[in-house]
């Protein structure tokens, strides 16, 4: 997906020559092409799985599950964050933070060159929250959607086709979905499609995550406060994702960030709670794991009920 997007981006920029309309059309074509081909590839693999499932159900199911897992970023996200937390826990001096900042830059979009330990922890907490939704719960949701489609007709897009279609839109947004320079037009369609595909999953996380934590306030108030803090964010999804994890993990998020040198003030979320710490970031990872188990169990029961 990344190679295709890079190639098509260079091609579109060369043809458009900074013409806004042509860049917009180029972005539309990139999004349609990459998402469609990703979904089609997943659909073709599903046909092979359904064919071989008859001959060797155990082996084909294990192989299909292995391919499905490629759509989930849970393991890589946890590994990256825990690696940063381990380095911080070693009490590295202020002038030795270069290595930590470099590792952080691989999982966040903000500038990291001048971040101190507290700001590194805040960035880690925020990316753990947002990427749990973008990298785990959104693809899980579209897998479940595909599994439900299969209950009606096996020729419809299934879990892999839907997960890879989402993954394509998410990758496009990550690579060219920025409001700077030519990308403001070229990445517009991909960014909007990603927002649309994360819209429902982020709100299901908002409603379900409080059941996995022991917050000081009621579940209803946790959801209400998270919505109030998160909805003011410029993104229709990331603010809500960060807010619900902030209230459930009892950690403050938001503040001043820099993106390519440009200052941006993010709304303060859960301001009555303390700033991010190693413990609170680990708590976010733990909450994410618990919710994954709950989602898998709930959707298994839904599919089971539909087969009765």
Image (cartoon, rainbow, N blue to C red):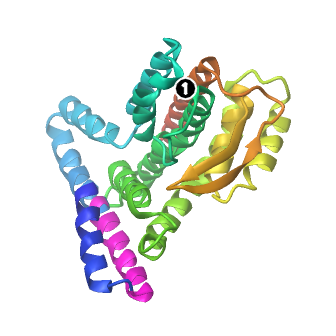
> In this rendering, would 247 be left or right of 160?
right
Residue 250: x percent and y percent? Answer: 74, 26
Q: Residue at x 29, y 59 (%)?
A: 38
Residue 198: x percent and y percent? Answer: 54, 54
Report the front residue among 42 and 275.
275
Q: Residue at x 44, y 67 (%)?
A: 190
**Magenta segment boundaries in residue numbering:** 19-38
Q: Residue at x 47, y 40 (%)?
A: 136
Report the front residue among 98 and 61.
98
33 part of magenta stretch = yes
Secondary structure beneath dot 1 equals helix
Report the front residue among 9 and 37.
9
> In this rendering, would 131 be left or right of 228?
left
Q: Residue at x 33, y 72 (%)?
A: 30
Q: Quadrant of the N terminus?
A: bottom left
> In this rendering, would 153 be left or right of 262?
left
74 part of magenta stretch = no
Disc 1 residue crowd, few under 14, some 14–19, many 20+, Cα 10 Å: many
Residue wearing tag 1: 285
Q: Is residue 134 above or below residue 210?
A: below
């Amino acid at each position: 997906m990344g190679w295709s997007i890079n190639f098509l981006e260079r091609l579109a920029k060369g043809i458009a020559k900074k013409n806004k309309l042509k860049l917009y059309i180029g972005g539309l074509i990139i999004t349609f092409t990459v998402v469609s081909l990703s979904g089609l590839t997943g659909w073709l693999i599903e046909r092979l799985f359904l064919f071989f499932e008859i001959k060797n159900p155990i082996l084909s199911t294990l192989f299909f599950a292995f391919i499905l897992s490629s759509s989930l970023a849970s393991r890589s996200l946890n590994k990256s964050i825990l690696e940063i937390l381990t380095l911080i826990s070693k009490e590295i001096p202020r002038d030795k933070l270069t290595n930590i900042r470099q590792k952080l830059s691989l999982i966040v979009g903000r500038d990291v060159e001048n971040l101190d330990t507290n700001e590194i922890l805040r960035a880690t907490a925020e990316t753990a929250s947002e990427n749990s939704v973008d990298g785990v719960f959104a693809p899980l949701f579209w897998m479940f959607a595909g599994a439900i489609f299969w209950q009606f007709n096996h020729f419809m897009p299934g879990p892999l086709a839907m997960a890879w279609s989402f993954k394509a839109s998410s990758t496009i947004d990550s690579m060219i979905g920025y409001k700077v320079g030519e990308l403001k037009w070229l990445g517009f369609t991909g960014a909007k499609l990603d927002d649309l595909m994360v819209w429902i999953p982020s709100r299901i996380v908002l409603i379900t995550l409080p059941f996995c934590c022991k917050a000081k306030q009621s579940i209803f108030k946790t959801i209400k406060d998270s919505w109030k803090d998160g909805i003011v964010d410029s993104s229709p999804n990331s603010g809500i994702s960060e807010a619900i994890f902030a209230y459930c993990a009892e950690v403050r998020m938001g503040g001043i960030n820099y993106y390519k040198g440009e200052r941006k003030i993010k709304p303060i979320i859960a301001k009555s709670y303390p700033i991010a710490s190693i413990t609170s970031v680990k708590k976010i990872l733990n909450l994410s794991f618990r919710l994954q188990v709950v989602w898998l169990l709930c959707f298994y029961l839904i599919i089971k009920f539909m087969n009765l």
